[in-house]
Amino acid sequence: PQNYKQAAYWLTKAADQGFALAQFNLGFMYDNGKGVPQDDQKALDWYKKAALQGLAEAQTNLGVMYAADQSALQDYAIAYSWFNLAALQGNELGRKNRNLILTNMSSSQIKEGQILSTALYEKIDNQAR
């Protein structure tokens, strides 16, 4: 059996040190209520920290959070921007989700998503230097 509470403890220590994979995994735990209380805002915050370091899986999960119909966060342009970043790195789920969400977007939302995606790409690229 897995000890999610202990995993959350150690992942928090690593995530606080800036390790993207730990941030992603901690976001997943908050997203799914594994070892910690389910908390969309904390999931979003940890996914975003990992996504801004270029982790495609975190970018995809952020896109899912922004695309969800029942979410108070729903914003297709933001979802598109994160899916697109993941897709540009070869993440297949990001590519599929980006293409799927396009069918629900207006042309102005698509343009906004592309602008956001470019801005995020440049921010991530500048941080990597």
Image: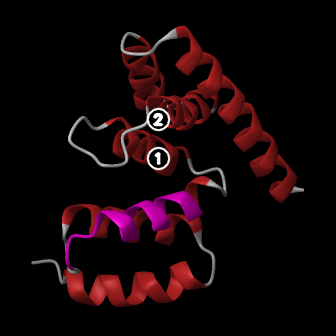
12 w.r.t. 28: above or below: below
Residue, disc 2:
79
Residue at the image point whose x is 39% and y is 42% from the top: 66
How far across and down, in percent of the image, does residue 55 sit? 58, 51
Kind of residue at badge 1: Glu
Residue at the image point whose x is 54% and y is 38% from the top: 82
The answer to which of marks 1 and 2 sits earlier in the sequence is: 1
4 w.r.t. 86: above or below: below
Q: Residues within 10 Å of mark 1 (few under 14, many from 20)?
A: many
39 w.r.t. 113: above or below: below
Judge by depth and name the residue closer to the eye, 17 or 30: 30
SS class of the residue under badge 1? helix
Image quadrant of residue 101?
Answer: top left
Kind of residue at badge 2: Ala
How far across and down, in percent of the image, does residue 56 sit? 54, 44
Residue at the image point whose x is 81% and y is 42% from the top: 122
58 w.r.t. 99: above or below: below
| Residue 31 part of the magenta-drawn span | no
How far across and down, in percent of the image, does residue 127 sit? 82, 58
Residue at the image point whose x is 58% and y is 33% from the top: 81
SS class of the residue under badge 2? helix
Q: Residues within 10 Å of mark 2 (few under 14, many from 20)?
A: many
Residue, disc 1:
57
Judge by depth and name the residue closer to the eye, 89 or 124: 124
**Magenta region, residue range:** 37-49
Image quadrant of residue 32?
Answer: bottom left
Describe residue 68's horizontal placement relative to residue 119 as left or right.
left
| Residue 44 part of the magenta-drawn span | yes
> On the rendered image, what quadrant is the C terminus found in?
bottom right
Calculate the distance from the C-alpha at mark 1 to the C-alpha at mark 2: 13 Å
How far across and down, in percent of the image, does residue 76 sit? 44, 29
